[in-house]
Structure formats: structure tokens, C-alpha cells
Image (tube, rainbow, N blue to C red):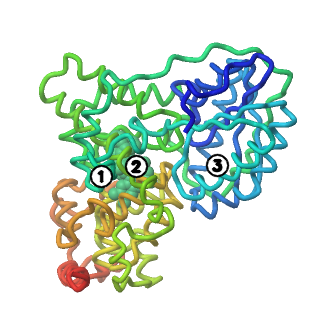
Amino acid sequence: MTDITSMPTSNTNSRTLIWFRSDLRVEDNTALQAAAAFSNPVVACFVITPEQWREHDMSPIKARFIYENLICLQQSLLDKCIPLKIITVATFDLLPKTLLSLCQSCEVTQLFANHEYGVNEKQRDYQCERLLSDSGIGCHFFHDQTVMAPGAVTKSDSTPYKVFTPFSKQWRKLTHWPPGVAANIKPQVMPAIKPDKIDKQLFNLGPHPAIAWQAGEEAAHKKLQAFATQAMGDYRQHRDLPALEGTSSLSPYLAIGVLSPRQCLKVAYDSLQGANPLAEEGIQCWINEIIWRDFYIHILDFFPHVSRHQAFKIKTENLPWRYDEKDFQRWCSGQTGIPIIDAAMRQLVETGWMHNRLRMVTAMFLSKNLFIDWRWGERFFMQHLIDGFLASNNGGWQWSASTGTDSVPYFRVFNPTTQGQRFDTEGEFIRRFVPEIQHLNNKEIHEPPLDLFSSASYPTPMVDLSLSRKTAIQHFKSLE
Ligand SMILES: Cc1cc2nc3c(=O)[nH]c(=O)nc-3n(C[C@H](O)[C@H](O)[C@H](O)COP(=O)(O)OP(=O)(O)OC[C@H]3O[C@@H](n4cnc5c(N)ncnc54)[C@H](O)[C@@H]3O)c2cc1C
């Protein structure tokens, strides 16, 4: 990472290139801020990598949301006199040469970008930096994706935390309050470079559900503010109830960086001022979720094997996971015969988003009751989520499968039926997504009566919950 104080002194004859990746915003963007402070004019670029995206299981809905946000970003950048150029290469390995050509054609001498922490992304940046440096172009990378930079929250012996609670305590101790948000950059001098047209076809990874999120920083901030005034204070009581809009639904914006976690924290901090004790609890509880996000990014950075499809706890690689395509398809399509699981999986496929409580319940059902390799579920989530985010998705899956850092103990297996009864007591959420059983009463909706199955309108439960739970625990026990 380049420290701003160690950067070459600003030069009005040189141009800088700001490379946008998962930070699609103009406000509070560390690399953009540094680029604008360093030289004027500034040129921007974004790289489309369709094959790489496919390899990384990027969902069509997320690709489309990136496209819509790029259109907004291009306009916001133009307002600052920064033209956005688009590079298209199939995969990361083809990028360095193309990026160098862009730098040369735009007469750029310095490149600025914010870090990304997946193994392939780090390798990509290393290769680009090597080629560009050899050609005399300086490269400057910044930590921006988290509130606290990876490496900034460690144990006293400088090793990384592997457990969330002590990490969060140290994080709260070290985080500066009120959280800092960078001032907006001033308009630059317009260079004689035309912005590129953004080709929608290149984002067309396949059919997807309609997008319920409006693109752009302004829309994201509106949603954040609305959540702060209407629901943040009740977050603690409402966050586990999928039938309510009790959580922020900001994850699609955070995943591609239309919002920064610092901006979220700043609004939470402002809401804390004058909040009553109950609301304060809710706000603190929400801040904790932003810390979970930081935690999983720190894990991804410190333990790169998790982004290579490996379990955090290596010994769990010896578990006899099942690879049953038919059972997996029943889970994917919401036909398991367990109403809360089916409602959740249909929510994912039909909307591109799933409530957090249900992500845990469905992930645990797949990895414990069906004992199917959690990596199959992790991929399916990435392929459908609008907010697919490697660090959090991998962290959430490994937590649920008890293979990860600070994961749920293997003997604590959620019973999905009980979870449904507890968090969707009146079956409102189930009725929304599983209409074929909406006529059942509030008790039956969680455990449909057997005569319903014989009418074939809804499948019989595909697995005995109690027996499969015992078998999973036995498999984990045998590792000890
Ligand atoms: C199996 C599984 C897979 C998941 N996959 C993803 C994913 O691909 N992308 C993703 O952003 N989140 C993922 N999560 C975390 C969490 O479910 C979502 O962030 C949350 O549901 C998003 O809804 P929200 O914006 O309303 O969250 P809120 O409850 O309003 O929380 C605010 C923000 O905090 C962050 N956050 C909340 N909970 C978590 C968490 N447990 N871990 C990390 N960050 C969190 C998110 O950025 C979220 O937008 C996953 C969780 C599980 C259990």
C-alpha cells in the first residue's frame, strides 16, 4: 500500500489514472481522493472481464447492477471532468498489456486504485504493477474496502484474530469516532479524452430477476438515511424476522462499493446522538454487522486458502461430504418439503437476495442435514445473489458448515422447522414464497399435514431432520 506522504510530488503535467473496481462511487473513495490530490487532470477506467466473472460465479443480476451503477458513476465523474474509459478483456491474465496501452494512449504516468483481497485479484494487481512499473508508470494501492485496514486489527503478538468477539472489541477500541468520511473532490480540468460508451451486452451473463434496487450513490444514500430514521433503532428486535423489512438491504451497494462502510458508520454514529437506550442497542447491533464485514475481509486477506475453495479448518477437508445432484437440485429449487427452507431458496432465485437468518438456516440445512459439500451451496449463492461478496459469502458458508473461523460449533445444528416457527411465527414469509401451502393454518404451515403430500401439491420432507442431524454430528465427532 502506498502511503500518501511517500507518493511522488504532484505534477500538473502528468495525468493519473483511477482504476475503479469494487468501489463504484465518487464520494469517500480513498484512491480517487489521492489521485485528484496528486494531479489534475484525472482519467478513470473500469475493466470488464466476462470470462473471469463467470469463473468467479458472478451472478447475472450482480453484473447487471454493476452496469447500471457504472452508468451513474460515469455521469458523476463527468461532473468532476473525469472521463471514464472501459477496458474489456476475457480474464485477468490478459489485462496488464491492455492496461499499459490505455496508460500510454492517455499519457498517464501514475495509476491509483483501491485494494481487493481475493487471491486472483491480488495476483492481477501484482502482474499489472510489475508491467506498469517497468514502463515507468507509478502504481499506488489503498485500503478502502473496510473501516479498519487488514493488518490494523491484530492480537498483541501481531497475529490475526480468528474469533469475532475479541476482534470486534479491539476494532471498536481502535476505530476513530466519529468515523471519518473523505471530503468530496473538486471538479478537475477536463482532459482531451472522450469517455467510452458502456456496452450493455458485455454485462449480459444470463437471465436474472428484476432488480429491486435503484442504481447510483444518491439512491444508496437515500436508502441508508431511510433505514437510519425508520428502522435502525429497532434493528435488534426486527433483524431476524424475514417477513419484515427489519434490515437495511444495503448489501448490494456495499458489495460493489456504491456505498463505503465508513459512510454507513458515520450515519450510525449520527443516529446514536440523542438515541434512547433501546434505539442505541439497535444501532450498536447494526454497527456489529459492519464489523462482521470487516472481520471476514481481514480473514480473506490473512488466510488466502479460503479464497481457493479450501476450508479454513483444514481437518474438515476429511469429512465425507455428499455430492448428490438430485438432492442438491431440490434444495436449489425450493422443493425440499421443509417450508422455511423452500421459501428462502425461492426468495433467492426470484429476487437475487436472501434474508441473513435464512442464509444461515438454508446453509446449515444443506451442509448438515443433507451433508452436501458447503462449496456447492457457496457457488449457488454467488451465482444468484445481487450482493455476492467473496469474503462474506465464504465466511457465512464456512460459519454454517462449521469448517470456518469462529464457526458455529458442529453440534449446534439449527432445526429449520423450529427456526421457521420462531422467526416466521405466523408463516407470513412462507406464504409469500410458497403459495401452494398458503391456505394452511399457522401451525401446519411449518409442518404441512401428511394428507397434503398425497395430493402432490407440495413435496414430502426430503430428509429426517433428527436422524440427519445425528449423522452429521457423528461425522464431525470422528474428526476429533
Ligand atoms: C451463508 C451466508 C452467505 C452470505 N453471503 C453474503 C454475500 O455474498 N454478500 C454479503 O454482503 N453478505 C453475505 N452474507 C451476510 C449477510 O447475510 C448479508 O450481508 C445480509 O443479509 C445483507 O442484508 P442487509 O444489507 O439487510 O444487512 P444488514 O443486517 O442491514 O447489515 C448491514 C451490512 O452489514 C454487512 N453484514 C451483515 N451481516 C453480515 C455478516 N454475517 N457477515 C458479513 N457482513 C455482514 C453487510 O454488508 C450488510 O449490508 C452471508 C451470510 C451467510 C450466513
Q: Earlier in the sequence, mark 3 or mark 2?
A: 3
In the image, residue 374 above or below residue 61: below
Crowd band around label 2 with a 10 angstrom C-alpha radius: few (<14), some (14–19), many (20+)? many
In what element is the residue under mark 1? loop
Disc 2 CB within 8 Å of nearest ligand 1 atom: no
Q: Quadrant of residue 112?
A: top right
Disc 3 CB within 8 Å of nearest ligand 1 atom: no
Q: Which mark is residue 125?
A: 3
Does residue 94 appear to the left or right of 402 in the view shown?
A: right
Rounded to the nearest whole Å, what is the CA distance between mark 1 and mark 3?
26 Å
Crowd band around label 3 with a 10 angstrom C-alpha radius: few (<14), some (14–19), many (20+)? some
In what element is the residue under mark 3? helix
Q: Kindly indicate whether the residue at mark 3 contacts the one at mark 1 (C-beta within 8 angstroms).
A: no
- Look at label 1 and name its amino acid: Tyr
In the image, residue 118 above or below residue 82: below
Disc 2: which residue: 298
Does residue 241 appear to the left or right of 346 in the view shown?
A: left
Q: Which mark is residue 161?
A: 1
- Look at label 3 and name its amino acid: Asp
Q: Kindly indicate whether the residue at mark 1 contacts the one at mark 2 (C-beta within 8 angstroms).
A: yes
**Residue lying at 23% horizontally and 63% vertically, measured from the top left:** 408
**Residue lying at 27% horizontally and 31% vertically, measured from the top left:** 232
